[in-house]
Amino acid sequence: MRMWWFITTLAITAFFCNSPAYAYDNNPLQDICVAVNDSQAAVFVNGKICKDPKFATANDFFASGLNGSGIAAPGAGGAAKFLDVNNMPGLNTLGISIGRVDLEPQRLVPFHTHPRATELITVLEGNVYVGFLVPDAANFFKSRLFSKILY
């Protein structure tokens, strides 16, 4: 009797623990959510208050400042500047950040990840060796390297 009870409990537990789970980002509820610091605005999304879309302008999606190099930290090997929702309010809820990195010659950007994000590289002067890794479907313990020299 004890063995039957144990097997039944184990089967029920295995059934509920192995049920499929679906986790994904929901689609946005609106096309744009221009961030605004006005506490009278009606919609609050992503930690920011949204401007009424009827009052959005082209300036909400514009920012200058990437045309110049950022301030280099000593020993960092380059300088960086970034645009996000704090500099360009129209980026709120779009999942976009924009950055400019000026590398010194013979410098390396360490391996890093971008969960649910992408990276675009444009080379204006010199060349950069870039690449990314993806898991190899044939062997779990190996990865495939996609690399390119950008001029």
Image: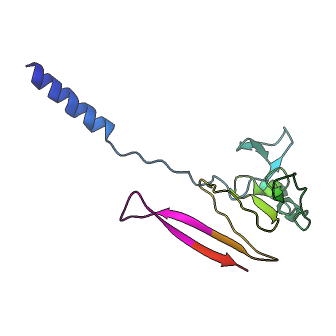
**Above or below for 136 versus 127:** above
Query: For this rendering, which residue is in front, 104 or 67?
Result: 104
Residue occupying image coordinates x 79% and y 54%: 84
Q: Residue furthest bottom?
A: 151
Total label count? 0
Q: Quadrant of residue 89?
A: bottom right
Residue 38 spot, x, y in % from top left? 86, 42
47 and 134: which is toward the camera: 134
Q: Residue at x 82, y 62 (%)?
A: 61
**The N terminus sits in image quarter:** top left
Residue 136: quadrant of the picture: bottom left
Q: Which residues are magenta?
A: 131-146
Determine whether, in the image, residue 47 is placed left or right of residue 83: left
The image quadrant where one finds the C terminus is: bottom right
Taking the spot 69% from the left edge, 57% from the top edge, the residue there is 94
**Most distant residue in the left direction:** 1
Nearest the camera: 72 or 70?
72
Query: Is residue 144 rendered magenta in the image?
Result: yes
Q: Is residue 23 magenta?
A: no
* Left or right: 54 in relation to 23: right
On the image, the x and y values in percent for residue 4 come to 10, 25
Residue 67: which quarter of the image?
bottom right
Residue 47 seen by the camera:
yes
Decide if residue 145 is on the left or right side of residue 62: left
Observer able to see residue 51:
no
Q: Could you tell me residue 68's position as x and y percent?
A: 92, 65
Q: Is residue 129 above or below residue 109?
A: below
> What residue do we see at 23% from left, 32% from top?
12
